[in-house]
């Protein structure tokens, strides 16, 4: 019998499934090895093998990623490669897709960098909550850099173009070498003592990880973290990151970008100033218009306060009041006359003699009804009393005594004796019969 439950895959489908599994199952990782079989086709991609003493793996470095590496791969070169595990589905070949590559000689520096980054991040030195805001209009800008560096010239050119009115103070330091980190620390401390700059730029051009090692110093990071002046770093190229970048209040991808971050553009300032000037002119014109209208209104009021004008107005007012008073008196007289006529009509309709006679007749009827109600009530009460007397007499205990029964209580008449268990020999008891009481003693 043919099994219809089998799942049959095409080779391309199988390779696609394996490729997806490899991508999802392996994170981004670092691999160390020696380059061999290096190929550079016209596409710009690099194809090579990465090997050690016992094994090798095919690798691909695509053109769009190769521009971010500072090494030129060569056969026999030992490198550190960062990438993802993948599968070349067309051939079913297991491979490593490279994203970054560096000479294996700087591997130790990279490990030290990552360890320090993790340590300072745990301390909270990279937390945005502790970052200072940059001043919008700094009074003076400080630059910590090498006085011969091209980066410094780029910064000065940009500041001169954007805000020539803001003075610049340069703190010259080395930016590479064994003394660079200490000199940069001292420059930051001196700037905090001077308190003459509102913002500081730490700048250096691009370089390898070894060239930027001064900016991965823990003491320098501590000094940047503790400074009271906002610091912007412009170190290296866009892909370069240092510990100083993470601790600084703001990182710029290049020294030129750092200069633009800290400097207001004079053209924008001129435009804002022009807009402010226009706004102020409009407000002043509006104020003048308001004051002129106020003066005109006050002038009109002053004319109205003239005595002759006031007498004329009051004379007209008096005439109007007289007319209103006359009409009001006439209307009141008319209303009073109508009220008198209406009252007379009501008095004639409601004569006191007729009302007295009607009330007397109603009173006689109510007295008659009251007498009848009293008689009926007395009869009902007598019948009820007779019924209750009969019922009471039926349950009178004295009636029981007349038939020969007796009520026995203790000597103090507080408790009725209903059982011999309540008595003992010698107890005195009281026996009540229909015509008296008998005091007895239990023998």
Image (cartoon, rainbow, N blue to C red):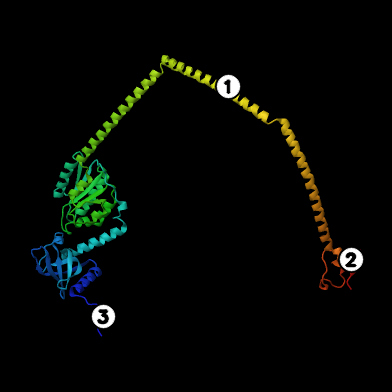
Q: Quadrant of residue 216?
A: bottom left
Q: How many marks?
A: 3
Callout 1: helix, strand or loop? helix
Going from N to C along the chain, the mark reached first, 1 or 2, is: 1
Which residue sits furthest left? Answer: 42
> Disc 1, disc 2: CB below 8 Å?
no
| Residue ID for mark 3 | 4
Q: Is residue 111 visible?
A: yes
| Residue ID for mark 1 | 333
**Residue at image location 24% in from the left, 71% down from the top:** 21
> Quadrant of the image for the C terminus?
bottom right
Q: 54 or 218, which lies in front?
A: 54
Mark-to-mark CA distance, 2 and 3: 114 Å
Q: Is residue 149 visible?
A: no
Whole-percent x, y for residue 126 in the image = 28, 55
Whole-percent x, y for residue 20 in the image = 22, 69
Going from N to C along the chain, the mark reached first, 3 or 1, is: 3
Q: Is 160 situated above or below 291?
A: below
Callout 2: helix, strand or loop? helix
**Residue at image location 50% in from the left, 20% down from the top:** 324
């Amino acid at each position: 019998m043919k099994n219809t439950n089998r799942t049959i895959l095409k080779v391309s489908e199988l390779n696609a499934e394996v490729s997806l599994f490899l991508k999802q199952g392996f994170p981004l990782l670092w691999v160390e090895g020696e380059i061999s079989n290096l190929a550079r086709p016209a596409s710009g991609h690099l194809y090579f093998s990465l090997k050690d003493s016992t094994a090798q793996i095919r690798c691909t470095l695509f053109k769009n990623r190769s521009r971010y590496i500072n090494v030129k791969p060569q056969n026999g070169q030992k490198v550190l490669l960062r990438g993802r595990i993948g599968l070349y589905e067309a051939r079913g070949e297991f491979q490593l897709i490279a994203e970054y590559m560096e000479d294996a000689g700087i591997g130790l520096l990279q490990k030290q960098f990552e360890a320090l980054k993790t340590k300072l991040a745990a301390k909270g030195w990279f937390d945005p909550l502790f970052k200072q805001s940059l001043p919008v209009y700094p009074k003076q800008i400080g630059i910590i850099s090498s006085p011969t560096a091209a980066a410094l010239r780029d910064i000065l050119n940009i500041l001169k173009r954007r805000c020539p009115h803001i003075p610049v103070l340069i703190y010259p330091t080395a930016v590479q070498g064994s003394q660079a980190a200490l000199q940069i620390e001292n420059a930051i401390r001196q700037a905090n003592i001077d308190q003459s700059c509102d913002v500081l730029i730490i700048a250096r051009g691009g370089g390898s990880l070894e060239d930027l090692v001064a900016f991965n110093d823990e003491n320098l990071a501590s000094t940047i973290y503790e400074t009271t002046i906002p610091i912007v770093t412009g170190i290296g190229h866009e892909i370069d990151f240092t510990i100083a970048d993470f601790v600084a209040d703001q990182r710029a991808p290049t020294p030129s970008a750092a200069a633009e971050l800290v400097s207001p553009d004079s053209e924008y300032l001129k435009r804002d100033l022009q807009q402010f000037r226009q706004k102020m002119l409009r407000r002043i014109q509006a104020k003048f218009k308001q004051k002129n209208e106020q003066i005109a209104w006050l002038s009109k009021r002053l004319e109205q306060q003239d005595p002759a004008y006031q007498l004329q107005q009051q004379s007209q007012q008096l005439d109007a009041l007289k007319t209103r008073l006359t009409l009001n008196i006439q209307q009141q007289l008319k209303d009073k006359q109508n009220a008198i006529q209406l009252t007379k009509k009501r008095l004639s309709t409601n004569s006191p003699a007729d009302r007295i006679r009607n009330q007397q007749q109603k009173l006689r009827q109510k007295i008659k009804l009251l007498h009848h109600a009293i008689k009926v009530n007395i009869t009902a009460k007598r019948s009820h009393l007779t019924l209750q007397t009969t019922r009471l007499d039926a349950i009178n205990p004295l009636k029981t005594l007349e038939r020969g029964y007796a009520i026995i209580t203790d000597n103090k008449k507080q408790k009725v004796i209903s059982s011999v268990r309540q008595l003992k020999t010698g107890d005195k008891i009281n026996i009540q019969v229909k015509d008296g009481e008998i005091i007895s003693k239990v023998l």
